[in-house]
Each structure stands twice: as structure tokens, then as C-alpha cells.
Image: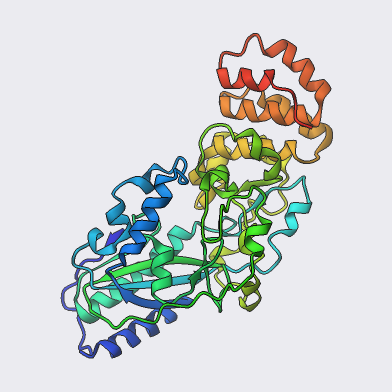
Amino acid sequence: MVATHPKPGLKQRAPADPTLIKAEIRAEALRLGFAAVGFAAAEAPALQEERLAAFVELARHGDMAWLAETPGRRANPVRLWPGARTLISLGLSYAPKDDPLAVLADRERPAISVYAQGRDYHLVLKSRLKALGLWMWNRWGRDLKVFVDTAPLMEKPAAMRAGLGWQGKHTNLVSRQHGSWLFLGEILSELALPPDQPEADHCGTCRACLDICPTDAFPAPHQLDARRCISYLTIEHAGPIPREFRIAMGNRVYGCDDCLAVCPWNKFAEAAHEAAFAPRATLVGRTLVELAAIDDTTFRSRFSGSAIKRMGRERFVRNVAIALGNGGGGADAVAVLTRLLDDPSATIRGAAIWALGRLSPARFEAEQGARLAAETDTGVREEWAATPSR
């Protein structure tokens, strides 16, 4: 959350008609490069808080403890800021040029979610939101606050209320113009502006996003159990990946685009023009073997300014090791996994043990005999004691 502050002397004459104010804000947002703009009342319906409470009650948020904190503030923007009258929802398209699922067939390379292949979208979106917020202050002199999803504001329900799209059966926002590929940010304003019409649900009988999920993370349409979601497991979850999900991860090392990419509404999405979201050279052409050997200094340098850096080397290399166990790489993969058996991180050692057992049972048995007795971490000892998955 970022509050904008006045700059004396910059305020201009402005129309008093709320409809004209709204039209000016929309035009300026589009000029700044936003692909979608919508308006809603800041006050959210009670149903939003009830759904959040049910999600938390079922513990489907996993390790994401912040979702259970101050649920009233999270579910209703006016509790976050009582002065808010209008919520402005804004979207930036990151629609990919190519099929993001094609990489899943190349088991020697990493599958990285489309949204993380370029510059960290938080940085891009926050800069754009602050520019729009400052323009609004200079124009009308009313307080406002800008949000990118690090603050406790439920952005997808907000975008749905503002007419940007609807929450599909995969719980993500779907737009008739941009498919499932919108980054979202919000501005809360003291200005009282007329709301847009919420978008209707256009999913119909389609359940492609539910059926493609590798780990059956959707207990029912419009319901997500994050504890089974590969995006959650690879990014948010600390410690070992539960054994039941490792094979299903395939070569996914950061996130999972399956449910997004299969949405039929994507056919209307034009490939994003935002240069900052183009795949970075640090990822293009990299192999899993290369990435498994990365040290902390190199990790921080290579992924500086990207969403990947925020997860840290431990989780990243853990995921790469699992991916190696699901793919090829031959002798090079066996060699790098063997080196990871000496990694200071117990989480990485455990993932490497599992992967080595998958790729080379003979090497697993040879290393097991020498290392099990000396290992002090309980979780790693359990990995050595387990029968290798085939």
C-alpha cells in the first residue's frame, strides 16, 4: 500500500461531474499503458468476507498465514481505509506470445510461470499506479492509496466488482478481452464515482481449467485448495515438497500455468506489448542442470529485479532438483544431484536424494550407504530411508 501526498500549486481546474471525472481517470490510465480500468464502490459485500472465512476455516491457505490475519480488513477495503469511497481496479496484460505449456514436454529445461519470466510485475505495476495516483491528486486534490497485491486487499474480487472480468472456475480473473493474463492493482480514492457494472460469469459448462490441474487442486468449481496447487508448493511452501506431489510437478520450478493457459477465453487476448514482461535473457536457454548448480550469490545476481528472487535460492534449487528427478539430463544430472547431497540446506539435500533415487537407483544406493549414518537432519534421513520412487 502506498499513499500519495499533495504537491502544492499543481492542482488544476477539474470538472465536478463524477461521470466526467471517471472518464478522465479512465483515459489517463489507458494513456499510461493500463489495459483494463474499472470502478466499484469501496465497500465490499459481506459475502466476500464469508468466503474468505470459509477458505481459512478449511485450512486451504496452507502456510500463507497472512490470509488468516485481520480478515475483516482484507475482505473489505473500507476497513482497510475508512476514508475510501471508490475502488479503481486496473489491469496490465502479460499475455504470452507462445504456448506456455510447450516447455512441459522438454524435461531438461525449466518451466517457469509466464508472469515471472520478465521483470517483477510488482515494480512495474506500482510505478504505473503511483503515476496515475499523483496525476489524480494534482487534478482533484483528494486523498488516495495505491495497492499491489502485497497489501491486504483481495484484488480478484475487487476486479470482478469493477467489471474487469469474472473469477473463473480456477478462481483466477478471466477477461473477455485479455483471457486469464492480467496483472491487477488498485487505487482507493476519497472521490465518490459511479461504479461500473460487474462482469457476468461466462465460463458456462467449460471445466478445462479444472480437468488439466496436475494435482487436483480444485475440490469444486470456484474453490482452490492451495495446499495441492503447484504454484503454492513451488513458491510459497517452505521445506520439503510433499512426496505425493513431486512427480506431478514435472519440470515446473516456479509456478504453474496449466489452468490459466488452457482457458478458451485466451484466444481473444493479444500478446502483451510491455517490454518489461518479455522473457529475461537469464532464463532463455538455461537447462535444469545449469540451474541446479547455482550458488546464492549467483542466484541473487541473475534474478535481481524478478519475482523469482523473492523465493530465495533454497526453494528454487529444491524445485530444480525435483524437476531433474522427473526428467532426463543423464550423467550430468546425476553428477549435479550428487553434489547437492552436500548442500548446507537440508531441504535441498532431501530433494536431491529423492531425485537421485529416480534417476539412478544404483548411485542412490551407493551414496546411501556412506551418507545415511552421518546425516543429522531427521527429514533428510527419512528421504534416505524411503524406497526410491520409480
Q: Residue at x 74, y 17 (%)?
A: 367
Q: Position of residue 297 (x, y in %)?
A: 54, 36
Q: Position of residue 32 (x, y in %)?
A: 42, 77
Which residue is situated farthest in the left direction here? Answer: 8
Asked if 178 appears above or below 154 in the picture, the reply is below
Quadrant for the C terminus in the image: top right
Can residue 33 be seen by looking at this rendering?
Answer: no
Q: Position of residue 318 (x, y in %)?
A: 61, 35
Quadrant for the N terminus in the image: bottom left
Q: Position of residue 261 (x, y in %)?
A: 65, 64
Which residue is situated farthest in the top direction here? Answer: 373
Q: Residue at x 40, y 63 (%)?
A: 155
Quarter of the image where one finds residue 84: bottom left
- Front residue of 199/180: it is 199
- Front residue of 80/57: it is 57
* Count of marks placed on residues: 0
Asked if 35 appears above or below 312 in the picture, the reply is below
